[in-house]
Amino acid sequence: MKLEKQNCLALLIDVQERLFPHIYKHTKLLKNITIALQGLQLFEIPIIVTEQYPRGLGSTISSLESLINGYPKFEKTTFSCARDKTFLEYLQQQPQKTLLLMGIEAHVCVLQTALDCKLMGYEVFVIWDCVSSRKKSDKNISRLRLLNNGIQITSYESLLFELCEDSALAPFKALSNLVK
């Protein structure tokens, strides 16, 4: 399936203060998510942000705040975003049917969200270099589950250039600068 800009919606799942420092390769993950968010904004892809029990895990990390300011943010206690009633009602009101997932933890909230959304008829892509878990082994296990359930795995660079389509288009130069 080829991505179409007008049909894409991105989810930034639970990248929160108290958990983030314990995530495998969190510094690299932050860099990748930052580039992905900036790239998605070049193509005006809508973004939804979730926070798992923010009273316990804190808010989304402050270094992403300027990139997510103005986007809808949902607090949840369910691991799957799609099992939170308020989030699900909002998602179902959106016209986009292709979901681009980023966040933590790959084997819990990202995995369960991907599986539930796939069952609901969404085309789901997990931006693999924009997800992680506390343990590398858990991240690896989630990849197998995702692939075995028909979830697409991609990288932020592959995704962004697919959205760009043509080096003659205006966003190409900005995109090229982002991924250098």
Image (tube, grey):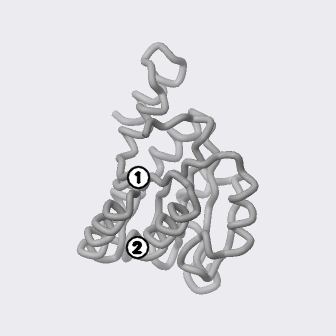
Residue at x 44% of width, y 36% of height: 2
Percent from the top left, x then y, of residue 140?
26, 68
The numbered mark at residue 21 is: 2
Residue drawn at x 49%, y 79% is: 18
**Amino acid type, label 2:** Pro
Quarter occupied by residue 57? bottom right
Whether residue 61 is visible, yes or no, is no
Neighbour tally class for label 1: few under 14, some 14-19, many 20 plus, Cα within 10 Å: many
Mark number displayed over residue 58? none
Residue marked by disc 1: 127
Instruction: Quadrant for the N terminus, please.
Output: top left
The first of marks 1 and 2 along the sequence is 2
Q: Position of residue 132 (x, y in %)?
A: 36, 66
Looking at this view, is 78 or 92 the one in front? 92
Residue at position x 62%, y 61% in the image:
49
Q: Are marks 1 and 2 in contact (CB under 8 Å)?
A: no
Q: CA distance from mark 1 to mark 2?
A: 20 Å
| Residue 65 falls left or right of residue 155 | right
